[in-house]
Image (tube, rainbow, N blue to C red):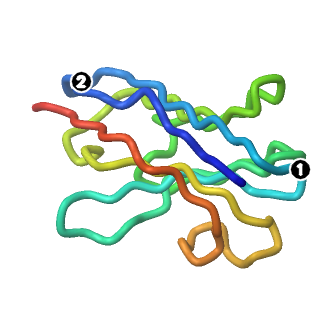
Amino acid sequence: QVQLVESGGGLVQTGGSLRLSCAASGRTFSSYRMGWFRQAPGKEREFVACIRWSAGTTNYAESVKGRFTISMDYAKNTVALQMNSLKPEDTAVYFCAAGHYLSGSAYYTSSYNYWGQGTQVTVSS
């Protein structure tokens, strides 16, 4: 049974940093793409960043480029999202997701078939 378990959310002031982690288990993910999405109250879930498990290639939403970094820890089967220079508009529930890398565009939720439970990130002004 595939499990994605996020951790690391919390409350931070504007300009601060947080590091989210997603522990993946239950299958081999070598052909998968790992993504981070976020959903603010009243808004649709949106793409934040993704990484190819085996190749390590990354993509970012324009709104987070230069501030967020996605990375893999292969020894721990974990994908991390380092978030720097946080802004109030980054406030959302952040979700880890996994999908086969040929399952369509990395930017769409429909391209991912496994999801974590989410972790809250709140940035105060």
Q: Return the x and y of residue 75 as percentages of the image width and height.
A: 83, 23
Apparent side of residue 13 relative to residue 93 in the rendered image (left or right)? left
N-terminal of the two: label 2 or label 1?
A: 2
Apparent side of residue 123 relative to residue 125 in the rendered image (left or right)? right
Q: CA distance from mark 2 to mark 1?
A: 34 Å
Q: Which residue is mark 1?
A: 30
Disc 2 secondary structure class: strand
Q: Is residue 98 above or below residue 4?
A: below
State the quadrant of the C terminus.
top left
- The three-letter code of the residue at mark 2 reads Val
Q: Is residue 122 above or below residue 91?
A: above
Which residue is depicted at the point 71% across and 48% down?
Answer: 51
Q: Residues within 10 Å of mark 1 (few under 14, many from 20)?
A: few
Q: Which residue is mark 2?
A: 12
State the quadrant of the N terminus.
bottom right
Which residue is depicted at the point 73% across and 42% down?
Answer: 25
